[in-house]
Image (tube, rainbow, N blue to C red):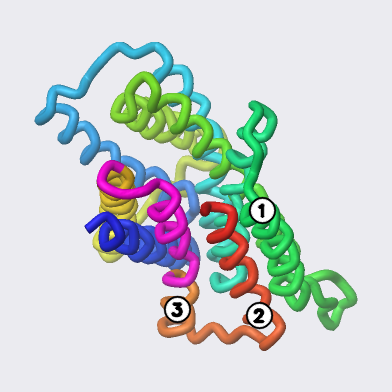
Amino acid sequence: MATLFALLSSVLWGTSDFGGGTLSRRLSAVTVAVVSEAIGLAGVLLFALITGGFSSAGGAVGWGLVGAVAGTAGIIAFYQALASGTMGVIAPIAALGVVVPVMVGVAGGDRPSAFQDAGIVVAIVGVVLASGPELQLDDGGSRRGARPLWLAGVAAFSFGVVFVALDHGAKSSTLMTLIVMRGAAIALMLAIAGLTNPAQLRFGPRDLPLLTVVGAFDLGANATFAYATRHGLLSVVSVLSSLYPAVTAMLARAVHHERLRKLQLFGVIAAMGGVVLIAS
């Protein structure tokens, strides 16, 4: 059962990422992030209300705020990258955020396994191969595709910090960490929108269904991942849940008709394989 729920989390995360990236092609990334985060926050608050999970855990608040800042930067950069770049390339790069908690663990005395060391090398090689064609010169002699790749890198680092914040905050209260993180992230994104361009928060009725899917699927992915970790081996669950970039890439190919060169395809597969090795 844990295996099934871990795979389900990959499907939900991959679909949510695809929906968020697709919406960001006609809406601002801030709008997509704010609405989807609000839907997720509503679900978490409802669960906390039903289960009586509210607490005043100080550690959860502190790490929740750290996660909010990192998560805000990550999700906005990620959606912008998906909107302007090749989803099949962007998603695996962003998934490399798993390297951050590994490095934090090393700094704290952990020793990565041979699989993880190999995974980091394989993932880096994969990213280089997948990203190379995106950096070719256009007819004007300037680089094309560089911005989405840099944004994907920012997203990867930011998501890695979120993983660390969740890990530390969970020692006090996982639920309160999520509540603080999502609530503070929404407030931060609204502040950013207010200081830059309030008009960017507009969206139409036709956007609401997909925005709801993005928020609900992201919340569902977190819930199924949490269930899987409670009923199965974390090493196995982490590997299976790290396959979500494949779902994003397949949806991008089916819906947006994205086509990767053979070198890029090999690089994406290598990057995903590296993520799996690191997570294991």
Task: Please determine whether, in this image, residue 204 is positioned above or below residue 73.
Answer: below
The percent position of residue 57, horizontal first and vertical second, equals 34, 13
Q: Which residue is mark 1?
A: 114
Task: Please determine whether, in this image, residue 166 is positioned above or below residue 22.
Answer: above
Q: Residues within 10 Å of mark 2 (few under 14, many from 20)?
A: some
Q: Quadrant of the N terminus?
A: bottom left
Q: Earlier in the sequence, mark 2 or mark 3?
A: 3
Q: Which residue is mark 2?
A: 266
Q: Which residue is mark 3?
A: 250
Question: Which residue is drawn at the image coordinates 46% and 32% (left, top)?
Answer: 167
Question: Which residue is drawn at the image coordinates 19% and 24% (left, top)?
Answer: 53
Name the residue at the left extreme: 50
Is residue 241 a member of the stretch shown in magenta? yes
The percent position of residue 141, horizontal first and vertical second, equals 89, 76
Eye-nearest disc, 2 or 1: 1
Task: Please determine whether, in this image, residue 108 is positioned above or below residue 114.
Answer: above
